[in-house]
Image (cartoon, rainbow, N blue to C red):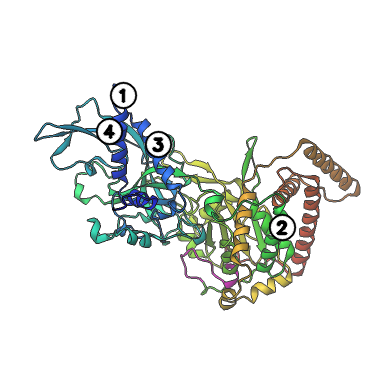
Amino acid sequence: MANNTITTADLVSELVSAPMKVIDRLFDNYKATTTTDDGPKSREFNQTVQDHFQGLLSKPGAFERIPVFGYPSSNATKTKSGSLVRFRCMVQDPSYGEELHLSVAQLVNSATGETKQVFSHYTDADHVIEEGWEVDYGSPSNVFTERDVAYCVSIPGQNEWAQLGASAAVLEDVLGSLNIDAQSTGESTDLPLVDEKKYPLRGCEHSAALVKFHSPGRAPQVAGTVDVVGIYELGHSPKEQGGSDASAQGRWPCIHAIFVCDITVDTLVPDLPQPVAGEHIGRRNMTLAHLGLVLGGDDLAAHYLLLHLLSKTVAVQDVKVGKFSLNLVGFPLSSKDQAPAGTFTLSSPATRWVSGMLAQLVPRCVEIPFELKTVNSSTFLPSAESGDLQAGVLQLAADTEIICDETCLHEGTLDERGLRNLQALQSVILDQTVTYVYPFQPINMATNLRVLVLSNGKSILENDCDLYLSETAAAFLASIHDESAASFMPLDPMHTEQIRQYLELARHMEFSVPTEVSNAISDEYAALRREAHEKGEKMMTQAELSLIVTVARLISISKGEPELSSASWKEAMALEARRGERNTQAKAARPATSADPSK
């Protein structure tokens, strides 16, 4: 007797290859059990669909069976229209607005007069109408709903380990197991449209799709990031609709989102159990040791780099605290012929070395070389002056690490655009805002970006903190060549994952400053100023106090402490004293040698 048992693998395969078939079956069951006079309720059934998909995909190994849409692991030409995909993306342009959509359609057979209802919530209506049937637009049984449409792109700077499917089957393998290919789908083998001007990093490969968010209030804001699970199809852009020549309209990848998930530490490091209490210090020491190796044994620089990696801008009573841009000084100057002009890649082996090591630890890194042609020819601010939001280099997802290479800034002229670009970057450093240039009123959008500047002399930008590297570290970095960097592997995969998890958990932990500690800091600040005044010495400024408080805050966070402690305040005072002494000695030994861009 044949075994007709349907396994979970069979259900998942059908869910991936023919999700609308599954939804149609659910809809038939729903209609059969609906007793209300007004017929099917779209929102109620929509929740039924979401619950079914999420329940089935929560089975072990099921979620990983969904093909990944998005560079670099996918090829959109091989994706079957109507199949289920997942897309880790950033909302680049949410201004595509709302679409009024026929969610439950009453169909009539023109030959027989027979009627039936279909659920077209997750696809456009013409994809579900069989031959001989047509929509009865006058039927009171039709249900219209609204959906938000946004232009979404691969997350700029997303490192390979943090991409969807980094440790699972890639799209081609999954599609192969489902016997899906470009020839069998009936889809065009032409590449779907991608607007290069709507991706922040020009010239970098990426994927893009119009994501249609059907659940109310689920469309993220501009530069927001999500994991989307939805049904893929090729369609037309809402901004192209209504044109006189429909045949000239491009076919854009569209993903109808069934549900979206926030990108959390559990999705970034899925196979690692949560650390138990007391493990933070061990992880902190491991991270410091690793960063010390990256920086040639400079323990002080390793401490400050760790604090920088843990920094996060938060609003406290309308004041932004926690930001900590860092300028590491002492990198070797790069020659003019080391970096290809106009590209977002770092120029010298030393800066690439640090950037490459950090890319192994944080989810997103964006490299900005201060090469004159790159700075003068790029657009750092997003702009909608043309009526369509064009991306700027600084339109980045929150928690992105921006690594600026100032060692390639040689003599030359910064033109007007270049100066505006550096001013925009300076606004990110000082105010954590990015200006979106709209036709009538620029809008300052709050952001949360970490900026690390690698330079030979003190940076031309004002940073929260600058630190001269030790002579040993500077010599180590000057000795790095591409060959030596490629052969240096200081961490095994398990320790790398532990550091990734440690950084993510610490960066997003809840933190507060107890009143008694705040009062003690205020009293000590007043006492130090009074003592300096009596001795005729320079008094600590409010800005210096604010920096020490930030350092103390980050030290406590690095230890897994949810509150600022007196011990961390004392450690911050000692650390800042060491930094001040180091910088004073370095400046006396050699003046800053950064190139002057005004020449």
Helix, strand or loop at label 2? It is: helix
Left or right: 17 as drawn, with respect to 500: left
In the rendered image, the residue lying farthest to the top is 37
Left or right: 219 as drawn, with respect to 267: left
| Residue 215, numbered circle | 3
Which residues fall within the magenta stretch?
A: 339-351
- Whichever of callouts 2 and 4 sits on the residue coming sooner in the sequence is 4
The 10 Å Cα crowd at callout 1, few under 14, some 14 to 19, many 20 or more, is few
Provide the residue designation for mark 1: 35
Q: Provide residue 536's location: percent of width, then percent of height.
A: 88, 49
Provide the residue designation for mark 4: 104
- Whichever of callouts 1 and 2 sits on the residue coming sooner in the sequence is 1
Amino acid type of the residue tagged 1 in the rendering:
Thr
Q: How many marks?
A: 4
Closer to the camera: disc 4 or disc 3? 4
Magenta-span inclusion, residue 85: no
Amino acid type of the residue tagged 4 in the rendering:
Val
Provide the residue designation for mark 2: 282
- Whichever of callouts 4 and 3 sits on the residue coming sooner in the sequence is 4
The residues bearing labels 4 and 1 have C-alpha atoms spaced at a distance of: 17 Å
Q: Quadrant of the C terminus?
A: bottom right
Label 1 with label 3: CB-CB less than 8 Å: no
Q: Provide residue 343's location: percent of width, then percent of height.
A: 46, 65
Helix, strand or loop at label 4? It is: strand
| Residue at the image position 61 percent from the left and 73 percent from the top | 488
